[in-house]
Image: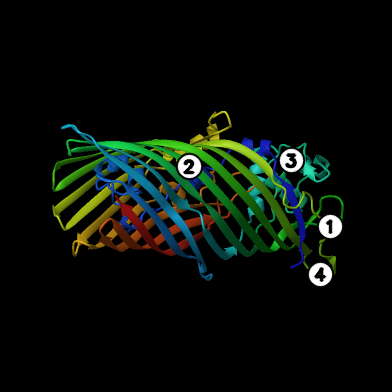
Amino acid sequence: MNKLYISLLLCGASLMASAQATFDVLKMSETELNGTSRYMSMAGAFGAVGGDVSAISQNPGGIGIYRSSDITATMNLNFLSTKSGDYKNLTDTKFWFNNVGYVGSMKINSDFFKFFNWGFSFNRINSFQRRYQGGYGVNGSLTNKIADNLTKGNWIDQDLSVDNYEGNIYYDSNAPWLGILAYQSYLLNANSDGMLRGLAVNGTNGDAEFYVDEKGHTDEYNITLGGNFKNVVYWGLNFGITDLDFDSYQYYGEDLHNAEIYDYRYDDGSTTLGYAGYDFQSYQETRGTGYNFKMGVIVKPINQLRIGAAFHTPTYYDMKDLYKVQSGFDLLANGEDDKDMYQGNTETGEEGYYDEYRYTIKTPWRFIGSLAVVPTSKGMISMDYEYVGANTMRCGDEGGYNYGDTERSIKDQLQASHILRVGAEYRVTPSFSVRAGYSYQTSPVKDIVKEKANNDVDVVSSNYMYQYDKNNQYITCGLGYRYKKFYLDAAYVHQTRVSQYHAYPGEIGEEVKDNNNKVSLTLGFRF
């Protein structure tokens, strides 16, 4: 299909008007199972176990368990696979170091205060690496949703016309930029009063196709202090600095028959039925830095039982988004030959140039309750419950003033998410151990959003697409070997995640499934 392509730069003022989308804020707040191989092989059920470099960022009280110094590094090999509908799996393989840490331990000559410990660690707490594609039949159109939103905002065709652009960049219009792009691409029609409507009418049908390619990660750098009171109470405090890096390319296209298209043979706004093929291509770069605090405690009333509790403050992010969006289109009246197709080769906006938008995010607060049973010196069973208050997230401007619309959307559409982690370890010999674990996380999205494509979902004006997780689970296992002061741990992690994709609110969407596998190796030295 030959297409006319138009690229528009996105205006910061326009994005500010719509605020940051609820599901974009949710994505930037997510975490996943990462850390040392011992930690991952027990599905992260370490809140009451402690004594692990990555676990101390989960429950800082775990640093009090240490009675010697520790240095460790972990590497991962990740096999990623994502499938949507009947489309083929899209796969990828990635290698990275996801955990490096050091813990220092100092014995205190006191009957009450036994040890004082400190630690520094790096953890990759989330990876955005994901690609998927899909498609389905439609009898509606994204252009109708764009037109509806413009009508609600009292925007008419004159607000979107070419008179509002100067050179390569639009300066004058405060209208939503996706509306401007659609209008300039002849995907919206206007009546005599300037009111706008999309391509789909009664009898319109066709197909939609989408492709999403996401990359990036969230890294956390931790400083932890803690100690040991009478070998009964182990406490810790943690300060974390986060670094977020996210890149996204999104494609959405429709091929519509019996669509209402602009009749290029006349200059009076006439329309006719015909074929309409178009696509939107959106590019996003997001960078953010943030900080958080964590506190935790582990209590050992008897040798066979440990009880843990930890509290994580929100991560307070300063964020920067760079956006660019492009459209391509073909319009053909019914009964016309290809030579009469409206087409060309025009671009507005400089290639590779993005507009910048700054804002702030406050991620959910978290509470973790943990229990570990150590029936013998050879084995233990542990369990964590984590409460994630997704509906407490906030988004605001550079000064920290919350966006009211997004805040209401978060409260209306999101709910608390619950994570259950169970892990076990058995020491076969003094040097060799086997481990296994399981973790399950519920969706942070309310049923009213999951049961239907909600027409009130908050989206940014440059891209109506949104997706969310329905559930996320891990099945894990691993091995450990100790030789004098050295140790070597290996883990295998299988992740299954079910998500829901929507090209725009009110559209049926498609289910997306991940089947990811990870192999990790940790090398450590205690002294």
| Residue at mark 3 to residue at mark 1: CA–CA distance | 20 Å
Residue 14 seen anywhere in this rendered image of the structure: yes
Disc 4 is placed on an element classified as helix
**Label located before the other in sequence (1 or 2):** 2
Q: Residues within 10 Å of mark 3 (few under 14, many from 20)?
A: some
Q: Quadrant of the N terminus?
A: bottom right
Contact (Cβ within 8 Å) of mark 1 with mark 2: no
Give the labeled residue for mark 2.
242
Lateral position of residue 486 relative to residue 85, left or right: left
| Residue at mark 1 to residue at mark 4: CA–CA distance | 14 Å
Disc 2 is placed on an element classified as strand
Q: Three-letter amino acid code at disc 3?
A: Ile
The front one of 214 and 293 is 293
**Label located before the other in sequence (3 or 2):** 3
Contact (Cβ within 8 Å) of mark 4 with mark 3: no
Q: Residues within 10 Å of mark 2 (few under 14, many from 20)?
A: many
Say above or below: 422 vs 193: below
Give the labeled residue for mark 1.
264
Disc 3 is placed on an element classified as loop
The front one of 455 and 227 is 227
Q: Nearer the viewer, mark 2 or mark 4?
A: 2
Give the labeled residue for mark 3.
156
| Residue at mark 4 to residue at mark 3: CA–CA distance | 31 Å
Say the numbered circle drawn on residue 376: none
Say above or below: 281 vs 113: below
Q: Three-letter amino acid code at disc 1?
A: Tyr
Give the labeled residue for mark 4.
338
**Residue 5, image x, y percentages:** 76, 57
**Residue 442, image x, y percentages:** 36, 51
